[in-house]
Amino acid sequence: MLARLKRERDLTIIVTTHYMDEADKLCDRIAIIDHGKLAALDSPLKLKASIPGKNILEVSFSGAPNNWADTLRALPEVAEVKSQENIFRISTNNGPRTTLDLLETARDANVAVASLSLQSTTLDDVFVYYTGHQLRDALQAPSTAESPYLMKRGGM
């Protein structure tokens, strides 16, 4: 309904949502508010471009040498490489360029790419970057044991 209104009329619509993918598709500007404080305000595209490590490549290899993580760190635009078992998570500022360089480097080293996925930055990533915590952490209600307004049975 909001998408239809946006297409048909020149309106300013203010929406409060915790669904970041919905906000990304529908909103021209987004405010990230954490505990009542404005953490960031801009278009979805500019917010996503404002955080480091804009894309994540998740890659597994067959026949990779022991120093393969160092080889991956040397690729252009790579910000960070983390490895666990045979899976490498590569944070990059330019996903397409790093992907091409990665494939060429693997081919030249006779290392087979077993799987490859590219994940673009999301507004959830933006929220975490600017607030320091996951959105779902902020949404969880405090336990009743932490409430100053409730007393336990049998005493104070």
Image (cartoon, rainbow, N blue to C red):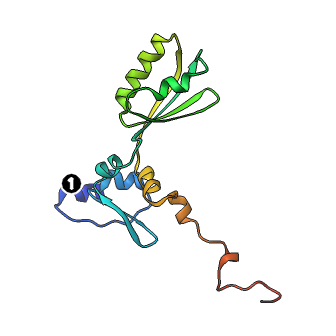
Q: Give the vertical position of 88 relative to 68 (above or below).
A: below
Q: Give the vertical position of 131 relative to 145 (above or below).
A: above
* The C terminus - image quarter: bottom right
In this picture, residue 144 sits left or right of residue 34: right
Other residues around mark 1 within 10 Å, as few (<14) / some (14–19) / many (≥20): few
Where residue 36 appears, x then y in whole percent?
42, 73
* The N terminus - image quarter: bottom left
The residue located at (31%, 54%) in the rendering is 26
Name the residue beneath numbered marker 1: 7
In this picture, residue 38 sits left or right of residue 12: right
Residue 96 in view in this figure = yes
Q: Give the vertical position of 31 relative to 118 (above or below).
A: below
Q: Secondary structure at mark 1?
A: helix
Which residue lies most toward the right here? 154
Residue 31 in view in this figure = no
Where residue 64 appears, x then y in whole percent?
58, 18
Kind of residue indicated by mark 1: Arg
In this picture, residue 94 sits left or right of residue 88: left
Where residue 13 appears, x then y in whole percent?
26, 65
Q: Quadrant of residue 78?
A: top left
Along the line of sight, the residue nearer the viewer: 108 or 127: 108
State the count of labels.
1
The residue located at (83%, 87%) in the rendering is 154
Q: Give the vertical position of 48 relative to 119 (above or below).
A: below
The residue located at (53%, 64%) in the rendering is 138
Which residue lies most toward the left here? 10
Where residue 106 appears, x then y in whole percent?
48, 16
